[in-house]
Each structure stands twice: as C-alpha cells, then as structure tokens.
Image (tube, helix red, strand yellow):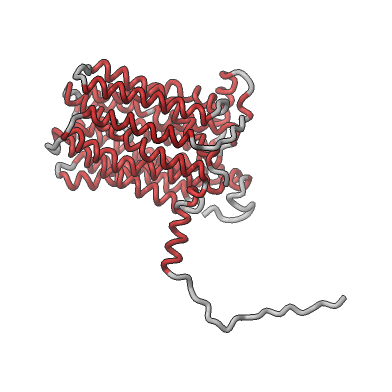
Amino acid sequence: MLIRPTYVYYSSMPIQPPSTASTERQGFANIVRALRHRNYRLFITGQSFSLIGTWMQSIALSWLIYRLTGSAFLLGVVGFTNQIPVTIFAPLAGVFADRWNLHHTIIITQTLALIQAFLLAALVFTQTVQVWQIIALSLMLGFINAFDTPCRQSFIVQMVDDKRDLSNAIALNSSMVNAARLIGPSIAGVLIAWVGEGACFLVNGFSYMAVIIALLAMHIVHKPSSGNGGHVISNLKEGLRYAFATPPIRSLLLLMAAISIIGLPYPSLLPIFAKDILHGGAHTLGFLMGATGVGALCGAIYLASRRNVIGLDRVLSMAGGLLGIGLIFFSLSRVFWLSLGMMFFIGLGMMTQVASTNTLLQTIVDDDKRGRVISLFILSFMGMVPLGTLIAGSVASAIGAPLTLAINGAVCIVACLIFIIQLPKWRKQVRPIYVAKGILPPFGSTE
C-alpha cells in the first residue's frame, strides 16, 4: 500500500500573541457565559430589580423594629420569625421542588411576596404599625421563602441548557444577589432618613413586578423528575438517606450549618453597632451593609471567573475562616472606616463560602434528587440562621453585641479548621463522583 507523505506547511508570517484587549474580552465572556441562555438572561434581569428591593426591605425592617423598641432581643425575634419557616418547611419544600412545575410555583411565591411588601408599606404609611404586625408579616415572608428558595435554586438547571455553564450560572446568581446587597442598603439608608421605612417597603413591592414579568416571558419546557412518584414522606426519607449517606454532601451540609448558626446572624446586630457603637444613623447602617455587599460581590465575581470546581473545597474552607476573622476585628472596631473595611471581608468570606458550597453540591448531586438536596442546603444555610439570630440577640442582651460577634467569629474559625483537617479524606471521597461526571479523568491529579 502506498503511503503518501504528509506535508506540513508553515506560514512565513510571524505568529502574533493575542492582544490584551482580546484576552480581556475572552476573560469577560467566560465570566458571563451563562447569559447566552435566554431564559437565564431574563431571570437575572428581573431578579436584579427584585433583590434590590428585598435588601431595602431587610434594612428598613431592622431599623423600624429597633426605632420602635430599642431592643436587641426583638431584633433577634424578628430575624427568627423571618427564617424559622425555612427551618421547618425547607425539607418538605424540596420534595415538592422535585415534583412541581418550578416555573409556575415561583410565579406564585413571588406574587405572594409582593402582597406582603405592600401590606408592610400600608401599615407604616397609615402609622398603624405595631410590633406584633411586623412579627406576623415576617413570619408570612419566611413561609413564602421556605418554598420559593429551594424552587428558585433548582430552577437554575432548567434555565441553563448547557450544563457546563451551571457553575457559572450559580456564581452569576450570587453576583446578582450581592450587587443588590451593595445597592439596596445604600438606597434604603437614604430613603429611611428622607421619607421613612414605608418607602422601602413600597419600592420592594413594585420590584417584585420585574421578576414576575421576566418569569412570564420565559419559554420553559416542564420536565417532571423521577421524584414525582411515591408518598411525600417516602420521598423525603429517600432524600435524607441519600444526602447523609454520601460523605461529601454530608460534610458540606454540616459545615454550612455550623457557619450559618454562628457566623451569619450578624446583620440582626448591626443596628446596635450603627447607632450605639459607631454613633451613626440609618445611613451608617446602609454603608455597613453596602460594604458587605462590595466584598460579597467581589467573591461572587471571583467564583464566576473560575472554569471548574477543582480546588473549590480549599477556597470554601479559607472563606469561612476569613468570615470569622472579619467578625472578630469588626467587633473590636470603634472607627467607622475600619468597620467598613471589616464588613468588606465579612461579605467576601460569607458569600464565597456559601456560593462555593452551593456550587459543589449542585455539581455532585444526582439530578433526580436535586430539589431535596438543595432544600437541605437551604435548611443548613437559611434555616439555621433563625436559631443563631435568636441566640445572638439573647446573648447580646446579656454580654453586649461586640463580645457576641467576637465569640461567633472564633467558633467559625474552629469549624473551618476542622474541615481543613478533613480535606484529604473529603477529596478522596469526592473523586469518584468527579470522575463519573467527567470533571476529572480516571487517572490524574485533583489539583
């Protein structure tokens, strides 16, 4: 058989390295690659407006309750009632997230949240608001979020057609949340000082219209999952067995729960720092929350720039430690600009830890159990915060807010050190999952 020689021709033109502008465009395209999916683009646009309103309401609610009562304990109570429904109902909501049409469910929950915001605005503007009404409406919103949050997190998969863009979509979602965290509190601080808390509740109510319109404009093909059949309790038990019998999932959930119960209740105490320690007003609280948002946004953008999940376990554990260090130094600060700097690091550590946990779980979980596992993540993330908030408010009433935050920060550091010690074992356990999903080759380094 005649074998023809292969000729390789080389151009005489010199090979030009890619320009800096071209490299920057490629880098930016990588960061926002999930936006090429139309439904996800609509989701991001609508949620961006809605979440600004959500953060405005959060700041206004804390300021309102502290203005009316001056009680650190009641700050904790309001935070507790806003989150406790997630603790109770999130696992059940995960079962339904694997059964229901997520698109239609989210439209309903967002509409109910709109009604809650308008009710708060009406009570404040008519000057009939009372503490029990604030607590009741916080409880209402908590119940709505218990079902809305697992459904929204699971819905990301349906909006992103190319599953290779899933981790980027989760990171961009975190970026959106934290951009809103930056903008919302700043606007809230100005509005509270100028008009009052009711304006923030009213703006939040209107902001829900943006996300509802975006949801209605989507074209979603509902694909029932295999979790549709069987008894609800049986499905719930199946999800719990799967999560806690899978060591990598179990360890991520336990670390998230520890950080949430100890590290994340700090916003409920911020009015005390803004008013009594830094001697400021509503605008001071807004700036503190805004600094948290800047740090959290930086963390989310960093995660969006990553190409895969390899090494994210180390990032996660270091971020939780950074959160703890930030809490300790913030508790010691009596200087406004130094406190702002510490809030930046608190936001950076908090969001990097939370978003990394979400990304790793979404990556390693089986699709037919996604809703149930994500509901357990929501339980570990949001569901533990009310208990931590109640504890933080009670402890702060006894020993003061600064010492409370310092203790919480130290415990966060200890929890992350325990996870770091277990990292070699964790990587060995997660490697077969990565190999099965094509993230790692059968033989090769995990680093």
**Residue toward you, 167 or 380:** 167
Q: Nearer the viewer, residue 307 or 425?
A: 307
**Quadrant hosting residue 239:** top right
**Residue 312 percent coordinates (x, y):** 46, 48
Residue 29 makes an appearance in the image:
yes
Image location of residue 1, percent across then percent down: 87, 75
| Residue at left offset 14%, top offset 38% | 278
Indicate whether 136 appears above or below 59: above
Residue 376 appearing in the image = no
Q: Who is closer to the viewer here, 401 or 195?
A: 195
| Foreground residue among 78 and 410 | 78
Where residue 64 sits in the image (x, y, percent)?
A: 21, 26
Residue at 55% across / 33% down in the picture?
Answer: 370
Q: Position of residue 285 (x, y in %)?
A: 21, 37
Most distant residue in the right direction: 1
Q: Residue furthest left?
A: 279
Q: Is residue 71 above or below residue 300?
A: above
Determine the image quadrant of residue 73.
Answer: top left
